[in-house]
Image (cartoon, grey):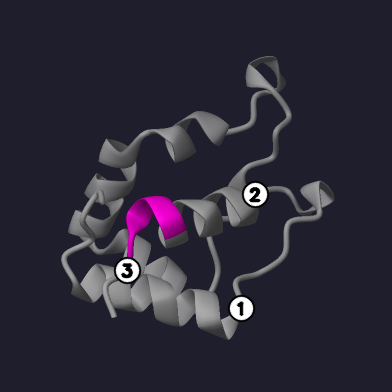
């Protein structure tokens, strides 16, 4: 199964990380909209360590009520990484 960044991965990232709090709140949402930042985290191994090994997305304050990744989301992310994490 080919995994699409646009169709499957980006929605996982947005649902798991994006706070929608706005740019003046000091939240870190800007990186979510920049594939090159995600690409560099994957290339360094830190993304895979966090998402696949620790089974969650980068830590953000829990007051945003964002849930942990599901087993299916982790499997989808793993497949995408194994496919070379294309921006498709």
Which residue position is annotated with label 2?
60
Give the label, 3 or 2, closer to the camera.
Answer: 3
- Give the percent coordinates (x, y) of residue 82: 21, 75
Query: Label 3, label 1: how many angstroms apart (C-alpha)?
Result: 16 Å
- Taking the spot 26% from the left edge, 73% from the top edge, the residue there is 2
Q: Which quarter of the picture shows residue 44?
A: bottom left
Judge left or right: residue 33 versus residue 43: right
Helix, strand or loop at mark 3: loop
- The tag earlier along the polypeptide, 2 or 1, is 2
Give the label, 3 or 1, closer to the camera.
Answer: 3
Q: Which mark is residue 70?
A: 1
What secondary structure predominates along the stretch shown in magenta? Answer: helix
Pick whichever, 10 or 56, lies toward us.
10
Q: Are marks 2 and 1 in contact (CB under 8 Å)?
A: no
- Taking the spot 26% from the left edge, 51% from the top edge, the residue there is 88
How many badges with numbers are in the image? 3
- Taking the spot 45% from the left edge, 62% from the top edge, the residue there is 8
Judge left or right: residue 54 versus residue 3: right
In this orientation, does residue 82 appear? yes
Query: Label 2, label 1: how many angstroms apart (C-alpha)?
Result: 17 Å
6 falls in the magenta region: yes
Residue 88 against residue 51 in the figure, above or below: above
Judge left or right: residue 70 versus residue 86: right
Q: Which quarter of the picture shows residue 27?
A: top right
- Give the percent coordinates (x, y) of residue 37: 31, 39
Which residue position is annotated with label 3?
3
Query: Label 3, label 2: how many angstroms apart (C-alpha)?
Result: 26 Å
Pick whichever, 49 or 68, lies toward us.
68
Magenta stretch in the rendered image: 3-7
């Amino acid at each position: 199964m080919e995994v699409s960044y646009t169709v499957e991965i980006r929605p996982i990232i947005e649902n798991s990380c994006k706070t929608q709090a706005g740019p003046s709140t000091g939240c870190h949402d800007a990186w979510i909209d920049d594939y090159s930042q995600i690409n560099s985290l994957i290339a360094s191994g830190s993304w895979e360590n966090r998402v696949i090994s620790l089974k969650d997305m980068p830590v953000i304050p829990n007051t945003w009520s964002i849930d942990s990744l599901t087993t299916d989301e982790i499997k989808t992310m793993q497949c995408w990484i194994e496919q070379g994490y294309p921006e498709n």
